[in-house]
Image (cartoon, rainbow, N blue to C red):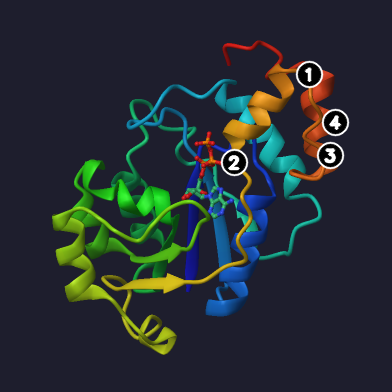
Amino acid sequence: MIGVYGGTFDPVHYGHLRTALEVKEALTLDQVRFIPCRLPPHRQRPSVPSEARRHMLEVALTDAPPEFVLDPRELERTGPSYMVDTLASLRAEVEDRPLCLILGLDAFRDLPAWHRWETIFDLAHVVVMTRPGYSSRWPAPLKDQVTVRVSEEKPGLPATPAGKIYFQPVTQLDISATFIRQCLAAGRDPRYLLPPGVLALIRRKGYYRNPLS
Ligand code: ATP
């Protein structure tokens, strides 16, 4: 099975990396593809350009497990980075192999606002990671999908290429890119929340110094 971990990674932090590792181990994923988005359709523009976010991710993955892979396909596409398009292009490459879209609880809750969100279930399973501060109450259309698609059993996932929802507990790390950006803008030190190489790159390039970013 192939994991798909999308995000703005503005910047990448241990909340992304540790949870990805735990999901990889829990579901025995063959690969976790980190897919930075170029232009997020549902939120503010990222604070730094895509190439900077990609570079930080490359640095973060230098000593990562071999199954962690940077996948730049959204950066290479024009227009908004719709996950449904990303999954469709991956599906064309991997044929019938199961794809698992890995989402934090916050991202999952917002899923009904995503472009062609119901088609996502035709293309991938959705693995939802628990996240501090977010309850598991969701809007009605999502609740309906959960009722129909939830898989209580991990072994259910590899049996089909797509279509199930699975809730994966992960170690609760209350780390967000927002908090790291705020620390940097305020001149505070965000070390221990993200890989030291990524922080060194941020400092060298002067990213996130502007309080408005
Ligand atoms: P921001 O603070 O800018 O909104 P973020 O820290 O949420 O950013 P994103 O790159 O937007 O990071 O998140 C990508 C994915 O990673 C989302 O599915 C999100 O839910 C998940 N994620 C991010 N941080 C954590 C965390 N600490 N624990 C679990 N999941 C996380």
Can you tell me whether the CB of the residue at mark 2 lies under 8 Å from the nearest atom of ligand 1?
A: yes
Amino acid type, label 3: Gly
* Whole-percent x, y for residue 124 in the image: 33, 64
Query: On screen, 130 above or below 196?
Result: below
To which quarter of the image does residue 97 belong?
Answer: bottom left
Number of marks in the rendered image = 4
Q: Nearer the viewer, mark 3 or mark 1?
A: 1
Q: If you read the primary sequence from the N terminus, does the residue marked by circle 3 or circle 1 appear first?
A: 1
Amino acid type, label 4: Ala
Task: Quote the CA–CA distance across marks 2 and 1.
Answer: 17 Å
Task: Quote the CA–CA distance across marks 3 and 1.
Answer: 18 Å
Residue 5 relative to residue 193: left or right: left
To which quarter of the image does residue 115 belong?
Answer: top left
Is there CB contact under 8 Å for labels 3 and 4?
yes
Label 1: few (<14), some (14–19) or many (≥20) C-alpha neighbours in 10 Å: few
Task: Quote the CA–CA distance across marks 3 and 4.
Answer: 5 Å
* Whole-percent x, y for residue 37 in the image: 47, 36
Which residue, given by chain and number where applicable, does mark 4 sit on?
200
Which residue, given by chain and number where applicable, does mark 1 sit on?
187
Label 3: few (<14), some (14–19) or many (≥20) C-alpha neighbours in 10 Å: some
* Whole-percent x, y for residue 162 in the image: 30, 71
Q: If you read the primary sequence from the N terminus, does the residue marked by circle 4 or circle 2 appear first?
A: 2
Task: Quote the CA–CA distance across marks 4 and 2.
Answer: 18 Å
Q: Nearer the viewer, residue 192 or 25?
A: 192
Tag 3's secondary structure?
A: helix
Which residue, given by chain and number where applicable, does mark 2 sit on?
176
Q: If you read the primary sequence from the N terminus, does the residue marked by circle 2 or circle 1 appear first?
A: 2
Amino acid type, label 1: Gly
Can you tell me whether the CB of the residue at mark 4 lies under 8 Å from the nearest atom of ligand 1?
A: no
